[in-house]
Amino acid sequence: MKLAILSRAPHAYSTHRLKSAALERGHECRVLNTMRFAIDLAADEPDMQFRGKQLSDYDAILPRIGASITYFGTAVVRQFEQMDVYTPNTANGIANSRDKLRATQILSRHDIGIPATSFARDKADVLAAIELVGGAPVVIKLLEGTQGIGVILAPDKKVAEAIIETLQSTKQNVLIQQFISESKGRDIRALVVGDRVVGAMRRTAQGDEFRSNVHRGGEVESVELSPEYQRTAVRAAQIMGLRVAGVDMLEGNDGPLVMEVNSSPGLEGIERATNLDIAGAIIDHIANQVAFPELDVRQRLSVSTGYGVAEIHVHDDAEIVGKTIAQSGLRDSDITVLTLHRDTDVIPNPRDSRVLHANDRLLCFGKLESMRGMIPARRKRRPKVRALPEDAIAEATE
């Protein structure tokens, strides 16, 4: 395999370990500065130049895109995708995870546990937004902060309001998030590769610091994750569109709460804490995918006129409940079930004898007109009635 690691820091621990792991396994590997590419959109086929010369052929890339170059970096990754070069982390996946608001919006739609979160831009809406997450204390996060930078714990509403107002005056967008008191100063980093967690560590803040990031002086220890935490980490990474990711979770009273999904996780802390060859696991996964790559099914299959990919939710009153896939009439309607999602289970390529249950979700490829007829009318959203404390109402209207 010929692999390119996209990184501006060839001597950084993670980049060095990944290159060494690739070379030890007999692969050809180079570290290429992400900012030295030129995207060629004039040629008959997608192409790129590197340092002013035509780029040679690569089997795969491993993006290590820093936050400061997200826009250009994802454009480079997207061009590699157009050239059919395998990447474990897609451009969309990197962009999704890099924007904390976008990532939280995506996770909240897929039954992934997250701390209660709100987002408001106008000063008049800040107090109401704080109450939406359960009131102070609250955690305030810059949308593009990294390594714990731009994460502030506000002990009361007045302090929170002042911090948010100050940040917004400098054109910064911030998230307001519930403070999970039972996890104060602790979190879990799970390193996901493909469809499994290859290593995990618990990070603990020191002293009065509530941020547990290693860059903030947090101590780390290896931890064995329960199946629930492993499933949550893998699902969060895959929902983002990432096959290599660091998933940060809080240990809530009711189970794991995902804080962040990192598309360029550092390896130094977790390799030293677990004494595992995380870099080697990443390289092995990429090599396996180069030999048998995953495809973006929705993009590849949606180019047929009149055909596409859609998700069908089997409601309680649907006629197909209790019937097998063969009896459901889906094939007669030119619809093929690719994957069946039932609760937390994923059943790929389900057999025709599989009985369908209420609340199953079917990822299907077929005639769009036929699938459209199986999707019920959208239910109107019910307005939430929240009782705000009288002092919050008074302050918000002053």
Image (cartoon, grey):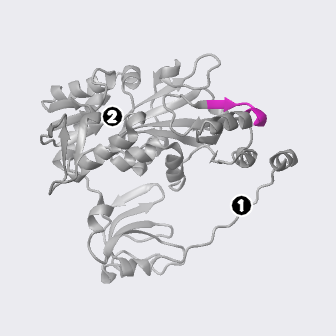
Closest to the camera, between mark 2 and mark 1, is 2
Q: What residue lies at 14% left-to-right and 57% top-to-bottom?
A: 44
First reached walking from the N terminus: tag 2 or tag 1: 2
Front residue (pair 16, 126): 126
33 sits left or right of 234 in the view: left
Identify the residue under disc 2: 64
Q: Quadrant of residue 24?
A: top left
Identify the residue under disc 1: 384
57 sits left or right of 396 in the view: left
Amino acid at circle 2 = Arg
Residue 385 at what x, y percent from top left?
76, 60
Q: Quadrant of residue 61?
A: top left
Q: What residue lies at 60% left-to-right and 40% top-to-bottom?
A: 174
Amino acid at circle 1 = Lys
Residue 92 at what x, y percent from top left?
37, 50
Residue 136 at what x, y percent from top left?
74, 37
- Give the class, few, some or many, for how many residues have Cα within 10 Å of label 2's Cα (few <14, many ≥20): many
- Distance from label 2 to label 1 (Cα)? 41 Å
Residue 187 at what x, y percent from top left?
54, 31
Q: Does the segment drawn in magenta span residue 196?
A: no
What is the magenta range? 152-159
Front residue (pair 228, 311): 311
